[in-house]
Image (cartoon, grey):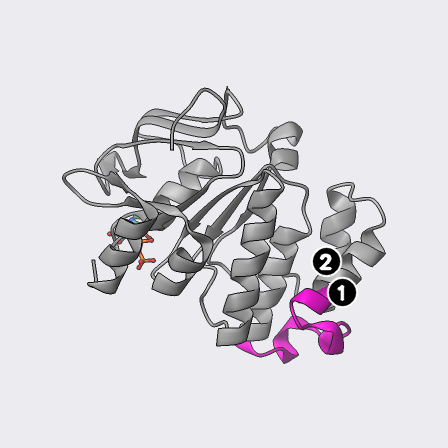
């Protein structure tokens, strides 16, 4: 998780609320095509860290850089490079599944948006629900829609918060495959997770969150830590 060609870099990064850190400072570097899982107990600061990576939360101290520049979510270039899917249900209630994805694709200047969306609907098993509104989808189908909205965006970095949530076993396996394909294309992927299989399947290294020190683990050590319940 180091090297000169760092795509995402955090240095002595402290994150938290109202001036109080939620975990120890973080030092990580993620290169092109690398995957980093963020693991740790409930409340250990995983989502908070991801929000800082996405420029949605100001660091208390330290820095976060994407492709050598400090993150600024308001910059168009940042939004063109970084796609994030966080926990919140962030869909448009008045748009169908397909309309939501096409709007997201067009908003990010994706070429041939219609056919890109149709492929994603297929990959996420949503083709039969393309014309459904979010409230008529199951919670797992809504989760698939949110993930598809992340995958429809152009990206050099993909940030996901517990992407395994509410997905069935088959969809989790498909997700592993999609993440591996993204990484093989050079996309850097950072995801918070509690899922041992997701870490095993992706072969990701991990950042283990803690109050005293956040440590980087090898893929094997990350799987072992999750297997023993951290
Ligand atoms: N908006 C907020 N304001 C104040 N404190 C918050 C806020 N969001 C989270 N926290 C606190 O920050 C700490 C870290 O929360 P965070 O959501 O980052 O943990 P997490 O590791 O993602 O947990 P989980 O595994 O349960 O998703 C928790 O103690 C939580 O109560």
Say if disc 2 is inside 8 Å of ligand 1. no
Identify the magenta region.
121-139
Q: Magenta includes 19?
A: no
| CA–CA distance in space, label 1 to label 2 | 5 Å
Asked if labels 2 and 1 touch by Cβ distance under 8 angstroms, the answer is yes
Assess disc 2: are there few (<14), some (14-19) or many (≥20) residues with their C-alpha within 10 Å of its C-alpha: many
Q: Nearer the viewer, residue 114 or 14?
A: 114
Quadrant placement of the N terminus: top left
Q: Position of residue 54 (x, y in %)?
A: 49, 39
Task: Give the image quarter of residue 76.
Answer: top right
Residue sitting nearer the eye, 57 or 108? 108
Is residue 105 among the parts visible in the rendering?
yes
Q: Nearer the viewer, residue 195 or 50?
A: 195
- The residue under the point 85% across, 49% down is 112
- Quarter-wise, where is residue 228 in the image? bottom left
Identify the residue at image location x=74%, y=78%. 128
Position in image of residue 62 (x %, y %): 32, 24
User: What label sits on residue 98 in the rendered view?
Assistant: 1
Q: Which label belongs to residue 190?
A: none
Label 1 element class = helix
């Amino acid at each position: 998780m180091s090297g000169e060609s760092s795509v995402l870099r955090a240095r002595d990064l402290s994150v938290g609320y109202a001036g109080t850190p939620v975990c120890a400072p973080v030092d990580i570097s993620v290169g092109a095509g690398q995957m980093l899982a963020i693991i740790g107990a409930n409340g250990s600061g995983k989502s908070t860290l991801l929000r800082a990576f996405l420029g949605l939360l100001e660091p208390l101290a330290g820095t976060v850089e994407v492709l050598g520049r400090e993150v600024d979510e308001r910059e168009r270039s940042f939004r063109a490079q970084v796609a994030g899917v966080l926990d919140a249900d962030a869909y448009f209630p008045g748009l169908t599944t397909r309309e939501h994805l096409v709007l997201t694709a067009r908003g990010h200047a994706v070429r041939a948006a219609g056919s890109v969306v149709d492929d994603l609907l297929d990959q996420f098993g949503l083709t039969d629900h393309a014309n459904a509104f979010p409230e008529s989808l199951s919670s797992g189908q809504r989760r698939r829609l949110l993930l598809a909205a992340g995958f429809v965006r152009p990206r050099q970095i993909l940030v996901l918060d517990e992407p395994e949530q509410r997905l069935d076993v088959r969809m989790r396996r498909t997700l592993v495959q999609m993440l591996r394909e993204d990484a093989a294309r050079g996309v850097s992927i950072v995801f918070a997770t509690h899922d041992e299989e997701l870490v095993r399947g992706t072969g990701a290294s991990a950042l283990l969150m803690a109050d005293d020190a956040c440590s980087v683990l090898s893929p094997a050590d990350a799987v072992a830590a999750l297997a023993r319940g951290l």
